C-alpha cells in the first residue's frame, strides 16, 4: 500500500524545517524529503555534525543558530527522508529516489522549500578546472573543512563577502576580492535605505564584513569588468585572472577562483509543476506568484523560503510556518480565524526580515558586463558546451525564444536541466534581440525535475512501508 501524508515538504532548510514543525503542532501528518544526508539546507548545511561546534568560530553564530531549528526538527514526529531526490510531484503526491530505494507517497498538499540557486557568472574561462561558485566553496568548507589557499573571489553580493570572511576566520590567505558591481548601484539603492534601517542588523553585518577585509589587507577591487580566467597545461586549469577597472588593467596568478553574482529562486521546482510565474525586473529573476501564505495558483502546491523569493534564513523560517498554517486551515484542522491569529507574529517577523531586501537588491544588482557576456567564445551552457556565438547565430536566423534554441542546440538539455544556463540564455537573447526578458520567456520545464533512471520510474508506484 502506498504511504500517505497530509503535507509533503521538499527541502529541509530553514523554510522546510519550520513548516514541518508548525504543521506537526497543528496535527498534520508530515513527510520531509531532502537530498542531503541531514537537515539544514544550504544555509545550515551539516549544522548537526560533531565537528560543527568547533568550526563555529569560522562559520559564525548565524550558522550555528541553525542548530536551534535542526535539533527540534529531528526530534519531532515527522517522517524524514534524507539523501532523497524528488523527481516528480503533482496533486496526488510525489515520487523520489534514494540510495536505499525510493518510492512514492500520496499527499494532500505539497510544499516546495527547495531554496535558491546561484546565478551563473558566464565570464571567459569560467568552466576551467579550479573555478567554482562561492556557494560551492562554502559547501566544501562546511562539509569537509576544505579550503583553497590564495583563491580569488569574483562577482558581487553578500555571500561572496561572507565566504571571503569565513576564509579569513579560518586563517586562509585570499588572493583578492574583485567586485563586479553595477555602475551607480549605490545611487539606486539609497532611496530604499530608510526601509532597510527598520532592520539594521543585516546592514551592520555587511559593514563588519567589509571592515574585516580591509583590516586583513585583502586586495579589493571594485567596478571590475572584462574578467578573463586564463589557464595553461594539458587540462587547461586556471593559472591567472585578468580584469580591468577604473585604475587600468590588472592580473593575478592563482589556481582557484570563486564566482558569485547573487542567488535566484529555484525556479525549476515551481515551473515544472506549471505554477504561475512572474518576472521580477528588480531582482532579474523569475519567481512563482504567491499569496501571503505561500499558496500558488495550484490548489495543492505551496512555496516557502527562497524558492518563492530571496529573503534569506530570517525570512524563510516564518514563511515556512505561514505555509503550514495555510495547509492546516485549508484541510480544516484549524479555523481560518485561528490560522490568521497564529500567523500574525510570523507575518510580522517575515516583513521585518524582508525590509532590507530592496536596498540590497539595488546595491548588489548583477553587473550587465558579467551577466550578459559579449564574447562569442564564452560557453553559456556548460553541460552541452553551447557558446554565445551559437546563440547569436540562432537569433540572427530568427530564433524567437529559449525553447526553440534548446531544440536547435540542446542548451538546457544536460544534467542540470537549464539551472546553469537558462537565465543566461534568456539574458543574452534579450540583449541580442532588443526585447525585454519577460517577453523572451524561459525554458519550458517538465517532470522529471531531476535526472532519474528508468528503474526508479518503474518502481515509483511500488508499495513502500511508512
Image (cartoon, rainbow, N blue to C red):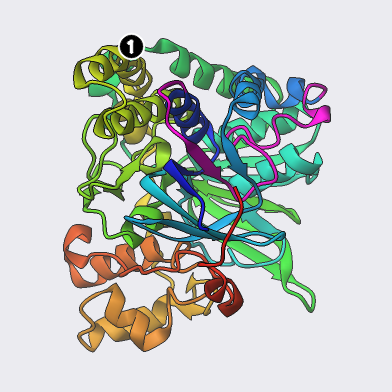
Q: Quadrant of residue 406?
A: bottom left
Coordinates of residue 291 in the picture (x, y in percent): 21, 35
Residue 39 lies left or right of residue 116; in this view the side is right
Residue 129 as seen in the image, left or right of residue 30:
right
Residue at point 31%, 26% (across, down): 333
Residue 262 showing in the rendered view = no
> Looking at the image, which is closer to me, 116 or 82?
82
x then y, percent, for residue 130: 72, 59
438 and 397: which one is in front?
Answer: 438
Pick whichever, 338 or 363, lies toward us: 338
User: Is residue 39 magenta-colored?
Assistant: yes
336 shown above or below 259: above
Residue 309, horizontal then vertical, whole percent: 34, 39
Q: Is residue 179 above or below residue 216?
A: below
- How many numbered marks appear? 1
Magenta-drawn stretch, dominant element (helix, strand or loop): loop
Q: Which residue is mark 1?
A: 345
Stretch in magenta: 25-54
Amino acid at each position: 500500500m502506498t504511504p500517505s501524508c497530509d503535507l509533503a515538504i521538499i527541502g529541509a532548510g530553514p523554510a522546510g524545517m519550520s513548516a514541518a514543525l508548525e504543521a506537526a503542532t497543528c496535527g498534520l501528518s508530515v513527510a520531509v524529503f531532502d537530498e542531503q544526508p541531514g537537515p539544514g539546507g544550504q544555509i545550515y548545511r551539516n549544522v548537526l555534525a560533531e565537528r560543527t561546534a568547533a568550526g563555529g568560530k569560522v562559520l559564525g553564530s548565524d550558522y550555528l543558530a541553525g542548530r536551534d531549528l535542526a535539533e527540534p526538527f529531528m526530534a519531532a514526529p515527522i517522517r524524514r527522508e534524507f539523501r532523497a531526490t524528488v523527481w516528480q510531484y503533482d496533486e496526488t503526491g510525489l515520487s523520489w529516489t534514494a540510495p536505499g530505494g525510493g518510492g512514492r507517497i500520496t499527499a494532500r498538499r505539497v510544499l516546495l522549500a527547495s531554496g535558491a540557486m546561484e546565478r551563473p557568472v558566464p565570464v571567459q574561462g569560467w568552466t576551467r578546472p579550479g573555478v567554482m561558485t562561492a556557494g560551492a566553496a562554502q559547501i566544501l568548507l562546511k562539509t569537509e573543512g576544505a579550503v583553497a589557499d590564495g583563491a580569488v573571489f569574483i562577482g558581487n553580493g553578500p555571500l561572496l563577502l561572507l565566504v571571503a570572511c569565513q576564509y579569513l576566520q579560518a586563517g586562509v590567505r585570499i588572493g583578492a576580492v574583485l567586485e563586479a558591481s553595477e555602475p551607480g548601484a549605490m545611487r539606486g539603492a539609497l532611496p530604499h535605505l530608510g526601509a532597510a534601517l527598520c532592520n539594521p542588523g543585516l546592514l551592520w553585518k555587511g559593514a563588519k564584513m567589509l571592515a574585516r577585509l580591509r583590516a586583513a589587507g585583502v586586495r579589493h577591487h571594485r567596478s571590475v569588468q572584462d574578467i578573463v580566467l586564463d589557464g595553461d597545461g594539458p587540462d587547461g586549469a586556471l593559472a591567472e585572472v585578468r580584469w580591468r577597472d577604473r585604475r587600468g588593467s590588472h592580473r593575478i596568478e592563482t589556481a582557484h577562483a570563486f564566482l558569485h553574482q547573487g542567488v535566484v529562486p529555484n525556479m525549476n521546482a515551481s515551473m515544472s509543476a506549471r505554477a504561475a510565474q512572474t518576472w521580477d525586473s528588480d531582482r532579474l529573476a523569475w519567481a512563482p506568484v504567491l499569496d501571503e501564505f505561500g499558496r500558488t495558483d495550484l490548489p495543492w502546491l505551496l512555496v516557502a523560503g527562497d524558492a518563492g523569493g530571496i529573503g534569506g534564513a530570517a525570512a524563510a523560517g516564518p514563511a515556512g510556518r505561514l505555509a503550514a498554517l495555510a495547509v492546516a486551515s485549508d484541510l480544516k484542522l484549524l479555523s481560518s480565524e485561528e490560522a490568521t491569529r497564529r500567523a500574525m507574529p510570523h507575518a510580522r517577523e517575515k516583513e521585518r526580515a524582508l525590509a532590507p531586501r530592496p536596498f540590497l537588491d539595488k546595491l548588489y544588482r548583477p553587473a550587465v558586463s558579467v551577466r550578459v557576456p559579449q564574447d562569442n567564445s564564452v560557453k553559456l551552457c556548460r553541460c552541452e558546451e553551447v557558446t554565445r556565438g551559437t546563440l547569436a547565430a540562432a537569433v540572427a536566423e530568427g530564433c524567437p525564444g529559449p525553447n526553440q534554441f534548446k531544440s536547435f542546440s540542446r542548451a538546457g538539455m544536460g544534467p542540470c536541466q537549464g539551472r546553469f544556463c537558462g537565465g543566461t540564455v534568456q539574458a543574452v537573447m534579450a540583449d541580442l534581440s532588443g526585447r525585454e526578458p519577460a517577453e523572451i520567456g524561459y525554458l519550458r520545464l517538465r517532470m522529471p525535475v531531476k535526472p532519474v533512471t528508468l528503474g526508479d520510474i518503474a518502481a515509483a508506484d511500488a508499495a513502500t512501508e511508512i
